[in-house]
Image (cartoon, rainbow, N blue to C red):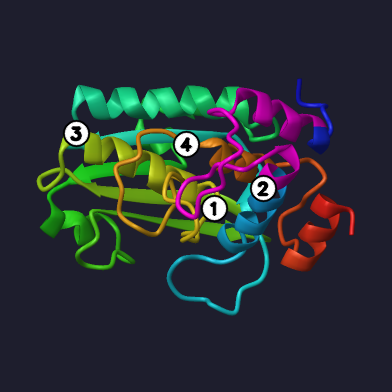
Amino acid sequence: MKKKTLAAVLALLVFFGSGMSIQVSAELYQPADKSQAIQWAIDMFMIAGFRPEYGDDARDYMVRWENPIRIFISGDYTDEDKAALEKIVQQLNERVLWLPDVSMAKKVKLANVTITMAKLEELIDYESNYLAGNWGWFSYWYDDYKINRANIVIASDVTSQRERNHLILEELIGALGLANDITEFSDSIITQEWTTVQQLNSLDWYMLNMLYDSSMHPGMTKKEAKKILTGK
């Protein structure tokens, strides 16, 4: 299953996408055809996959996980929070073909991704890099361009269940390596504008598969990645 070529993966994602439309929108990811779908995804990947949202503007290389990902959730989480997390874990394993295995950890000491749900004013207690006012935040650490640890905090007191569901998805996808927001498509889980989108769209799945494609490698620059993705 994980031996497919990148072209085959992208074709598969078109098939499993939310539906293709001939109407092009500045707000929704509605490409006219497969070629445009892939080109837009490459353009957005160049924005999302090579530097973080905050700080380090000069960075021009990709980082990603190379080892299995083990997630532990703690704090003031609801059953629905945990269910949303378990659902995206299953989807990641099914739909990102070269992503290392993702699973839930039973103990925090077994995890390399921690998610803490807490009151907004307490988030700084669980994440030293947290920027006040954000309802969700992630940080990751990497060595030799390979992510080895991530920490996510999400406000539990000022958010509805729908908002928390969205934040779980948004922060986790950022922690996988799509760390920078995009502004072009409002139905992406990593759009800069605040939304309560409840699932990844076709664009998000494209970008994740590009990031974790076997022909790519941690530390690759945008120029190097674009050459592989476009053949130019």
Q: Quadrant of residue 137?
A: bottom left
**Do labels 3 and 2 touch, CB within 8 Å?**
no
Q: Residue furthest bottom?
A: 58
x then y, percent, for residue 20 = 60, 32
State which mark lies toward you, 4 or 3: 4
State the SS at label 4.
loop
Magenta segment, which residues? 8-37
Please give the residue where the numbered disc 3 appears in the rendered image. Answer: 161
Query: What amino acid type is highlighted by mark number 3?
Result: Gln
Q: Position of residue 156 (x, y in %)?
A: 16, 43
* Mark 3 surroundings within 10 Å by alpha-carbon count, few (fewer than 14), some (14 through 19), many (20 or more): few
Q: Amino acid at mark 4?
A: Leu
Q: Is residue 29 magenta?
A: yes
Residue highlighted by disc 1: 178
Q: Which residue does the image show at 59% across and 79% down from the upper left?
A: 58
- Relative side of 208 to 156, left or right: right
Q: Which residue is mark 2?
A: 211
Cα separation between marks 1 and 2: 8 Å
Q: Which mark is residue 200?
A: 4
Going by the numbered disc 1, the residue's amino acid type is: Leu
Residue 63 lies left or right of residue 213; in this view the side is: left
**Marks 1 and 3, how far apart at CA:** 24 Å
Asked if the magenta segment contains residue 144, the reply would be: no
> How many residues crowd around disc 4 within 10 Å: few (fewer than 14), some, or many (20 or more)?
some
Lower sequence index among marks 4 and 2: 4
**Which numbered disc, 1 or 3, marks the residue that appears first in the sequence?**
3
Looking at marks 1 and 4 on the same chain, the residue that comes earlier in the sequence is marked by: 1
Q: Residue at x 68, y 66 (%)?
A: 61
